[in-house]
Image (cartoon, helix red, strand yellow):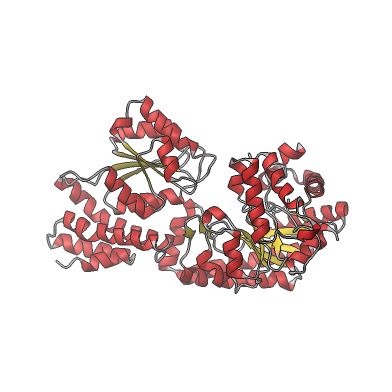
Amino acid sequence: MTPREALIAALTFQTADGPPPHLELEFHITREMFGQDALNAATFRALPHHQRGDALARNAELWVKVADTLGWSAITGFHDLPADAQAKGMQRVRDLAGDRFMRTAAVSGTLGIPDADDIGALISKIAGDPDGLMEELDTLCRRAEADIRTLAEGGAELIFLVTDYAFHGGPFLSPAMFARFVSPFARRLASAARAHGAFVVQHSDGDLRLMLDEMLGWGLDGFHGLDPRAGMDIRTVRERVGGRWVLFGGVDSVTLRNEGVAEAEQSALHSLRYGPWNGSGHVFTSSNCIYAGTPPENYRAMLAARAALTPASGNSIPL
Amino acid sequence: MNLQPLYDAVLNGDATAARAITEAAVAEGVDPQTLLSDAMIPAMDEVGRLFEINEYFVPELLISARAMKSALTILRPLLAASGAGSAGRVVIGTVRGDLHDIGKNLVAAMLEGGGFEVVDLGVDVSPEQFVKAVRDTNARIVAISALLTTTMTGMRDTIGALKDSGLREDVKVMVGGAPVTGKYADEIGADGFSETAGGAVRVARDLVPPAA
């Protein structure tokens, strides 16, 4: 079974041999572990057009190396780039690695927590012109639907809808506003991804426990994030969603960043123990990302906990 | 005068009504301090309470704060002319290296709604800028925000800078933000900590009680 096939098994709740598949949505220690910075949007945009192809190729080589070395099931290293560049990057990955890894992409097209500079204008619209706001959100969603088409035609097999809806202390919007201003568009994006044959997973930071029932109606395959410091402990969320979502995450990113190897291992074991549903439906990742400054030994401890799973224990730790 | 409509206008975030009621009340000769203390501040206290129990969310809180500000534009000159003081002056900012300010803005809005005069230094504020602002404004409270574990150490640096400048005994320091805990606040020598914007008002009132 290839890493990509292991991820497909998890995404479809099929039991597979070996530990759960692994990936990271963002991984900010490539310099420390591979001696090379990943390509980001700012660097990409600053490049002359004739140099961008080479930059995408170097980035593809880096992320295939990351995936091969660290046991990832998917390539996520182009998410920061515009949709057409993500699509070109995925083609480079395919040239290098064939179908060994799942090709993923990221899209943002719903109302999330705005920048502080924009929040005043948003509040005015919510209070004074909600219909106008809905028209703006429709335009945003249409653009994202077009991006999904570009990405799917470029080979993306898993689309992450990346929008933060919550703070540590709870959702940005009330449940009623969330249902009105977010859900219709999120459902459209999930539907667009599925129409192109892609899996679709929502990422959000923060505490979304109040919104889980609403979000379960969006047509997502899964959810990425699960920040225990925001109350979204993987055990809590698994108990709420059962087998309706594949869960990505649960290994505390802040623990990985700020604490030691033993704490990193404990957090990883907790995720491995409580992430699966009937032995599948779990993708082993950090709760947000591998932050810059995370000691590589802590990340390796997280991987070691996963690698220690034996054939007898299957792909999860018995409760 | 029945102050309930003004209370309701602020609570429901109706800026137009809040301003109109305030204008009418002032024209009738109602004491501006009464409007503030008996209607507007209690309404914002209720907003804070509703926010803490997840009945109000950020937009509702900010819409109410906007209504309060709308009415305050009428009252501020009158309060200043009458010599009425605020609950206290607060210098607030997000620590150096941290560009997040939604949480800080919520606390600022709630403090203002609670009757405090707020001097907002914005984001990425150095310890030296906090010290200068305290010196320039005679603030009674410094409120420091951080969202990142990597930047929250700036809180300790700011408290250190206040000590070095000889101002530490003159001001109370309160801290908050996603990674900040009460334990951390104690460790760095802060005087107060709150997990929520509404709670920040209570902490500020405890730190700087109104003069008898």
Count of marks, rendered view: 0
Residue visible at 51% across and 53% down?
A: A115
Residue A163 seen in render: no
* In this view, A92 is above or below A277: above
Q: Which quarter of the image is occupied by the C terminus of chain B?
A: top left
Residue visible at 32% across and 29% down?
A: B167
Q: Quadrant of residue A300?
A: top right
Q: Which quarter of the image is occupied by the N terminus of chain B?
A: bottom left
- Of A95 and A73, nearer the camera is A73
- Of B86 and B32, nearer the camera is B86
From the viewer's perspective, tell me whether residue A59 is left or right of residue A276: right
Q: Quadrant of residue A221?
A: bottom right
From the viewer's perspective, tell me whether residue B206 is left or right of residue A267: left
- Of A308 and A51, nearer the camera is A308
Residue A206 position within the rendered picture, expressed as x and y whole percent measured from the top left = 54, 57
From the viewer's perspective, tell me whether residue A194 is left or right of residue A1: left
Residue visible at 19% across and 49% down?
A: B79
Residue visible at 28% across and 53% down?
A: B114
Residue B3 seen in render: yes
- Of A280 and B157, nearer the camera is A280
Residue B74 position within the rendered picture, expressed as x and y whole percent measured from the top left = 23, 55
Residue B205 position within the rendered picture, expressed as x and y whole percent measured from the top left = 27, 47
* In this view, B130 is above or below A39: above
From the viewer's perspective, tell me whether residue B198 is left or right of residue A89: left
Residue A247 position within the rendered picture, expressed as x and y whole percent measured from the top left = 66, 63
Judged from this view, the residue extending furthest toward the left is: B29
